[in-house]
Amino acid sequence: MDVFFQINNIQPHIIHYEDVLEDSQSVCEKFVDFVEIETNFTFNIDTSKFNRQNNQLNLEWENRYRSERGILSG
C-alpha cells in the first residue's frame, strides 16, 4: 500500500485503533481537519461497542499482509 501512495504522491492520514479508543474526540477532530470538513460535532465512541477482532482468520490475514508487504518493499 505504501508503494501506491508514493507512486501517486498521496500523503495518507493514518489512524490507529488504539488512539481512537484512547481519545476518539481528538482523533476525529484531526481527521476532519485533514479532509477539510468544518464541524462542531462531538465525537464520542463511549457508547459504541468496539471489540477487538482477534481470531485465527485475522491472524491469517495479518500474516498474509506482512508476507506480501515484505515482497513488495524488498
Image (cartoon, rainbow, N blue to C red):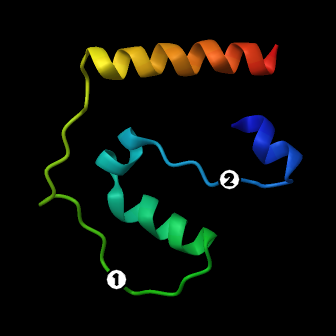
Residue bearing the label numbered 1: 41
The residue shown at (12%, 60%) is 47
Dot 2: element: loop
The residue shown at (78%, 55%) is 10
Dot 1: element: loop
Quadrant housing residue 7: top right
Q: Quadrant of the N terminus?
A: top right
Front position in the image: 29 or 55? 55
Residue bearing the label numbered 2: 12
Residue 66, placed above or below residue 22: above
Tag of residue 10: none
Q: Is residue 31 left or right of residue 1?
A: left
> Where in the figure is residue 51, as x and y percent of width and height?
19, 39
Q: Is residue 56 left or right of residue 33?
A: left
> Where in the figure is residue 22, as x and y percent of width and height?
32, 46
> Where in the figure is residue 69, as x and y percent of width and height?
67, 21
Q: Nearer the viewer, mark 2 or mark 1?
A: 2
Name which residue type carries label 2: Pro
Considering only order in the chain, which callout, 1 or 2, is on the residue closer to the N terminus? 2
The residue shown at (43%, 21%) is 61
